[in-house]
Image: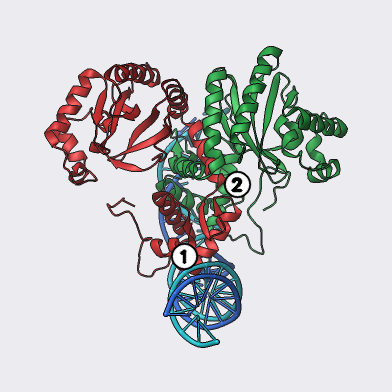
Chain colours: A red, B green, C cyan, D blue
Amino acid sequence: MKSNGVAEKQVEEKSTGRARGIDRVIALMEHLHSRRVPTRIADIARDTGTPRSTMYELVNTLVEARWLELRDGDGTVYFGPAMHYYGSDYLDSVDLIRKARVEVAHIAETVGETAQFCTLEGDKYLVVLNEPGRRMFRISSEIGIKVPIPWTASGRLLVDHLSADEILRFIPPEDFILPDGRRIAEDGFLEDIRRARTQGYVRTTALVDRFTTCLAAPVRDPAGRCIATICFVVPADTTEEAQQAMIDTLKASAERLSPGR
Amino acid sequence: MKSNGVAEKQVEEKSTGRARGIDRVIALMEHLHSRRVPTRIADIARDTGTPRSTMYELVNTLVEARWLELRDGDGTVYFGPAMHYYGSDYLDSVDLIRKARVEVAHIAETVGETAQFCTLEGDKYLVVLNEPGRRMFRISSEIGIKVPIPWTASGRLLVDHLSADEILRFIPPEDFILPDGRRIAEDGFLEDIRRARTQGYVRTTALVDRFTTCLAAPVRDPAGRCIATICFVVPADTTEEAQQAMIDTLKASAERLSPGR
DNA sequence: GACCGACGTCCGATATTTCGGACAAACGGT
DNA sequence: ACCGTTTGTCCGAAATATCGGACGTCGGTC
């Protein structure tokens, strides 16, 4: 069950190609999530290595349960309302996330910029909450999509409890290569982390996206370990003055979210 | 797949008690959603009519996929982060809901009261989006929980495209009985609907909860049919003046959400 | 109008998953 | 310390869900 670099993942190939329905369904949902777009049944079957007849059977069952929805009438399927209901139950059940929802919504509304709440999952960075700002230019929320730690501002906070050695052992080497092929220098990265520890926030500019600046502040547990971050995603040409105000906002929010103050 | 009055639902009992894993999983998730609280595996097995050994097997699989999470260490399970990711994908994929999220978040933040976005599913009323206000007294969001139409303010808008006869045929008779046993008079209900059509909003007080007032405005499709509502849930002693301001806010939001203006 | 590819359904065989029950460990009350 | 209850794992048997492939439709292309 380890996530290999490749996006697509055939279902476990044991001796025969036969698999349990539930494993097929998990592969199906992961596939839809990674594509993030309504997809034709035959394509899902091919890309997940599931027999076509099996996939049709399963999709029918899931559509009936509202886990999936037939879209457009062009034969594509995508997630259905049941996933939203179950997901909301999850959000409500996790104390930190429930509080973070309030903070993120509040600062996104008052500041007017996109705000996010992020954590680590394994050795990857993950957006858990995303509230778009008034500026509606970035539509794609990347909720639940794993991203290499060095690509992000928050990532520099989320590993700051580790030593330099531990950090480099923890992050897969290939994660230092940006989507455009550039390489992030490891010592610059470690220096960012050191500076962040003393400053109490991180700023990155033009990292994965040339015209975007990220501002992030750490949510820490009572032991001082960074367990999550809250951050703004803003245009790189935002004035320094405005950015400083946002940093103060983030620090205050992050402080309120840190358990045991 | 009809929802009978009884909350619990054994999995399809054909000739033998045997069922597909996927059907067991659907029953499991529905059970968790209806209980809305982390639950012990053995209890889920009993309440869904699933053999214990089968349930353990399935839960292990689902925990590994992050569909479920083991909680507390007391052997209970509940929804996991994957549900949130899939649910977010669903929200982003439905145009009206994506826009409604912005409106609901905005009015909840600016007005400071709990705002919701609601639709019909079958012959039941359903909360799709819920944004708690500053007043944090009502914790329970009821997202995805089906409620009888006559119990709600929004319900009076959502059926207003039907004639009186059609309405009474559409709503199951038992749905006119409130949780406390009181009966909602059918002609009063129909009168509410008539008035709502001309006024463009609905107000109900002390319906399902003695101290709560609901204010709702209709989102209409180009044909004028009410396809959803946006509403506030406020204390019954809110001043008339404040309520009027909220009604104006709701009408404006509902207008913005109505497709094709 | 014939051909080709994609879509969706159906059916029988068999590899496999579900199921029941047994078992050990952990728990908790007296 | 004793005993009844609950939790979680394991195993073999057999009921059945998955799979492959065949079939009829539909639409577009030459």
Circle 2: is it few (<14), some (14-19), or many (20+) Cα within 10 Å?
few
Tell me how many marks there are.
2
Helix, strand, or loop for circle 2?
A: helix
Could you tell me how far apart the alpha carbons at marks 2 and 1 are, in whole angstroms? 37 Å
User: Left or right: B11 with respect to A78?
Assistant: right
Q: Secondary structure at mark 1?
A: helix
Label 2 or label 1, whichever lies nearer to me, is 1
Q: Nearer the viewer, residue B226 or A100?
A: B226
Instruction: Answer yes or no: is residue B138 visible.
Output: yes
Residue to which mark 1 is pinned: A42
Q: Residue at x 64, y 20 (%)?
A: B246
- Chain letter of mark 2 equals B
Q: Nearer the viewer, residue A235 or B91?
A: A235
Residue B216 coordinates in the image, percent (x, y): 68, 28
Asked if labels 1 and 2 touch by Cβ distance under 8 angstroms, the answer is: no
Q: Is residue D9 above or below residue A116?
A: below
Q: Which residue is mark 2?
A: B46
Q: Position of residue A237 (x, y in %)?
A: 28, 27
Instruction: Name the residue rendered at 56%, 40% in the picture.
Output: B96
Give the residue type at disc 2: Arg
| Dot 1 alpha-carbon crowd within 10 angstroms: few under 14, some 14 to 19, many 20 or more | some
Along the line of sight, the residue nearer the viewer: B254 or A219:
B254
Mark 1 chain = A
Mark 2 and mark 1, same subunit?
no
Residue B76: numbered disc: none
Image position of A218 (left or right of B92)? left
Query: What x and y, as percent, mark residue B184?
Result: 83, 31
Instruction: Please give left or right for residue A256 compared with residue B190 in the image.
Output: left
Residue at 43% across, 63% down: A43
From the viewer's perspective, is residue A70 above or below residue B239? below
Residue B141 picture location, percent across and down: 58, 30
In this picture, is A61 found above or below B180?
below
